[in-house]
Image: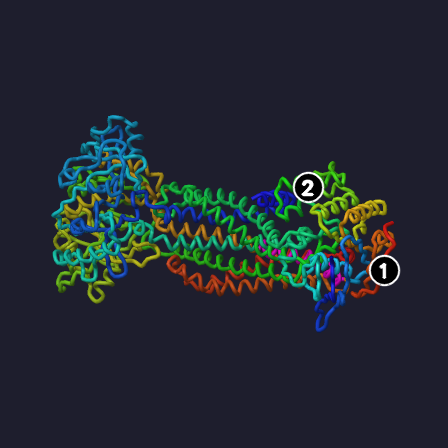
Amino acid sequence: MGSLIQNARYALRALSKNPGFAAVAIITLALGIGANTAIFSVVDTVLLRPLPYPDPDRIVQLQTSFPGGGNGVTSIPKFMAWRDLSQVFDDASLYDLGVGRMNMTGGDRPEQLSGIHVSASYFKLFGARLAQGRTFTAEEDIPNGPRVAVISNGLWRSRYGSDPAMVGKNIEIGGQPYEVVGILDPSFRWDPASDIWLPLQADPNSANQGNYLLSAARLKPGVSVAQAKAAMTLAADQFRRKYPRALGPRNGFTVQTLEEAQVANVRTALYLLLGTVAFVLLIACANIANLLLARAAVRRREIAIRSALGAGRRRIINQLLTESVLLSLVGGALGLMIGFFGVRTLLAMNPGNIPRIGDKGAALSLDWRVLVFTLIVSVFTGILFGLIPALHASRVDLNITLKESGSRSGSGFRQNKARSILVVVEMALALILLAGSALLIRTYIALRQVQPGFDSHNILTMNMSLGDARFAKTAGVAQLVRDGVDRIDGLPGVEAAATTCSLPLEPSFGLGFAIEGRPEADPQNRPGGAWRSVSPNYFSVFKIPIVRGRAFTDRDDGGAAPVVLVNEALVKQYFPKDDPIGMRITIGKDVGPQFSEPPRQIIGIVGDVRDGGLNANPFPIMYIPVSQVTDGMTALNEQILPIMWVVRTKVAPYSLSQEIQRELRAASGGLPVGHIRSMEQVVGESTARQDFNTTLLTIFAGVALLLAAVGIYGLMAYSVQQRTQEIGIRMALGAAPQKVRGMIVWQGMQLVLAGVLIGVGAGLALTRLMASMIFGVKAWDPTVFVAVTVVLSVVALFATYIPARRAAHVDPLVALRYE
Amino acid sequence: MIKLTNVEKFYEAGAGKTWVLRRISAAINEGEFVTIMGPSGAGKSTLMAIIGMLDGAWKGEYYLFGHAVHKLDNRKRVELHKQYVGFVFQQYHLLDNLTVAENLDLPLSYRDMRKAERQSLVADTLDRFQIVGKKDLFPHQLSGGQQQLVAVARAVIGNPKLILADEPTGSLHSSQGKMIMDLLKKLNDEGTTIIQVTHNDAWAAYGNRTIQLADGWIVGAQADAGAA
């Protein structure tokens, strides 16, 4: 311990004597370690931190399985089948997606809040603690049960001023009074965040096969995931016998841990980013190892003296490693700050749609795992970059070194070889990162060149929750839509207005249909598509072309013949040889009474919209006039999704926001609107995660390029300094300056070439791992590899040219006196 | 105390060998003050490095206090070195970043001595060499003679039985040189065996015996009359 402290003291003094070296090393390390801390803090929050519920690894999501995967959204009848599996599950719970909005009325000004409907067992399953009151009883969670609510601690504080007598009071939601029975403890967190919890009050006898809910349960003590899956398989067989049309023969039931269900789709990208920053750190290590090797040449005398005074090789290595680790610890501390606050800033600008990350990355915290990770990375880094120089230095030839008079001494071939290898490795790593980054940049460009099938310019969107008795039936909604659209259309600057149940690129639900005149398909192969209820001007607002037939008009109302528009993808898939116009389809057959409706006539074909994302092919979509939706479907829609108002403007869309809100409040009798966004913003949000990955990888590749350039510059500058005398002799013998310059540049570019060749080979192998993250470009895209090779080579050439130019300016007379 | 038999050292040079030392056989007894002389390139410093176990690549037999050095691995040689040998160099070789006291402490720290014991030895040595007032100075703040004084103090602080002094006065002017040689003589009188390399006949005369080297061979040995 004593010698460690002494080593550390001497190391501090040695570093303070070389502030330039220490600063370069610390900044390099801070960049390398900071990048790692940044990504690890995201990985920690998203993948490693347990869910904030008791026994989180025993909470499973109950899912419908299909060949190749599972799906969490489920129906009431399925849940009822799972709830009976009490031999494997405790506290099986059903709840909605939590994306709906609730209108808090009754105050000075109505307010839109986030809310979720849950079964009574939900609070026990997720271990929700209460600040006051209680959660729902089983008696309250029955169809047409009492109107009760549990509210969040935040809402209690912000809206009700922490009223100590809040429990037992009524609040007004959608014009209806609800008794507050409980206030949750601030420690309870739900993702997405919620203000109000209402009882789901699902009918156990419901035959509604619509999948719009989520279900989770706790594994009973001693029950494994495999045992739960086996029980679910048996339950699927029973369910299929009971509802043969609701579960296809190749589908079944399964479970997945809730944590896995939440994060599975971001895991690959996060691990890839973690691998990327490991590369950045390796480059930083190679750079500092190179600096240390150069410095070790200067310190050979000191090391020889220490050896002559009895220091064994281990002591010498310990001393040098203490210096390296000290450097990396300081760099690590700085990196911790850079990384943590850097990623928080990036997430604040672009949250990247990453689950569990909180609002603008608020869930990220410097917990013990991030601190321990940074400490381990720092110590490991210090040893990694310090070991090779320390081993080299400890092998010093004492006899020769001690006979040398000054501190200036040449370095042996082995040392330069080690430094050259490090530079080659740096080049190769930098090329791989550049290639990865370039592929994502090309993806970014390709996504922006994609024709989404609609025009997103000059469209303002906003939602309105219709949880109000006036809009419980379709006629009320249709009237509201007519009034609202009329009022908005009357505003100067508005081109067209419409409504939809969900925006393009945002989730919607799908329904199967039967084609009149064709034999009924089995449930597994029944035609289906996304279902959208829209008002007549929807296609004008989005400039979605009517390919054939006609668009909806105001005459397509509840009293008119039922009609439907389909997109080209639907026609291609289900009517490849027929003309669908005039044909009739029955939508939602056998799914449940809410969905039952008479056949609809296909009156037109509209252009495709990339609804599943800009990087996904268009899928079949059915468009239904909002005034022809069944009452049951309207009621269900109101519970799941708010209505979306979409307005095409002739001026900047946000400039009309206030007027449109005013008209909508007037049309709806005071209902609030929320989530006001331009359609361009919606499109931007749909690629937020790819953009986040692209931004990060580009930053890291930039750092890698800079470090690699510094690395080759450092080596060549050192080499020129070492060879000053040789260069002087060459020039004295008649070598022209350009010849000398060429010699040095060629020496450097040989290393660059070797690094590039290795990098291209390794890059071609590694970029395949990015296949799921790229779009519109192949992982082996020759343009990308040629471009990054050129960029890296040009930067390296520039970095090599500077010392080469210096070499060409060597004065032979001065150089030959150089001792 | 020291017995060298047919010690040889060479470097590979292309197809052949460049010999540095040839068939060196010599014996040095405890308490002797031996001077090694010879022209540049004769192999003097290499011989000192072999005796001091700084150089491990050689052939022949070498016994130090009965230990067969030629049979020891590097780790054991380091231990033997720490136990018996102190070095004084022409260029002083003090560590620039360490103070005088810390330079003195360095060899003790490599002997895994307790801190209190080391501090006491450093204080004694500073006192003995009358450099207490300079203990917190850095080498560049001292004159050449003072630096070599510290270097000698550092060489003897571990109480070695053998001091190897490679041209200890080579960088000093004559009065400083005399001070150092007097000091070495005093240490020799107190029982420390000393082997020095020098080109200076006056300093050679401090020893009681001279070994002459030329082109790696011992070309002569003579006993001197005694200290000057």
What is the span of residues highlighted in magenta in the rendered image?
A: A709-731
Whether A226 is drawn above or below A370: the answer is below
Q: Give the label on residue A39, or none.
A: none
Within 10 Å of disc 2 (Cα), the crowding (few <14, some 14-19, many 20+) is: some
Q: Main secondary structure of the magenta part?
A: helix
Residue A203, position in %: x, y? 14, 45
- Tell me, yes or no, if residue A264 can be seen here: yes
- Circle 1 chain: B
Q: Establish whether labels 2 and 1 are both on one chain.
A: yes
Which of A254/B64 is in front? B64
- Residue A712 forms part of the magenta stretch: yes
Image quarter (top left, top right, bottom left or bottom right) of the N terminus of chain A: top right
Residue A691, position in %: x, y? 41, 51
Disc 1 target residue: B222
Do the CB atoms of the residues marked 2 and 1 lie less than 8 Å apart? no
Residue A749, quarter of the rendered image: bottom right
Image quarter (top left, top right, bottom left or bottom right) of the C terminus of chain A: bottom right
Q: CA distance from mark 2 to mark 1?
A: 37 Å
Q: Residue at x 59, y 48 (%)?
A: A323
Q: Amino acid at mark 2?
A: Leu
Q: Amino acid at mark 1?
A: Gln
Which element type, helix, strand or loop, lies under badge 1? strand
Disc 2 target residue: B121
Residue A277, position in %: x, y? 47, 52
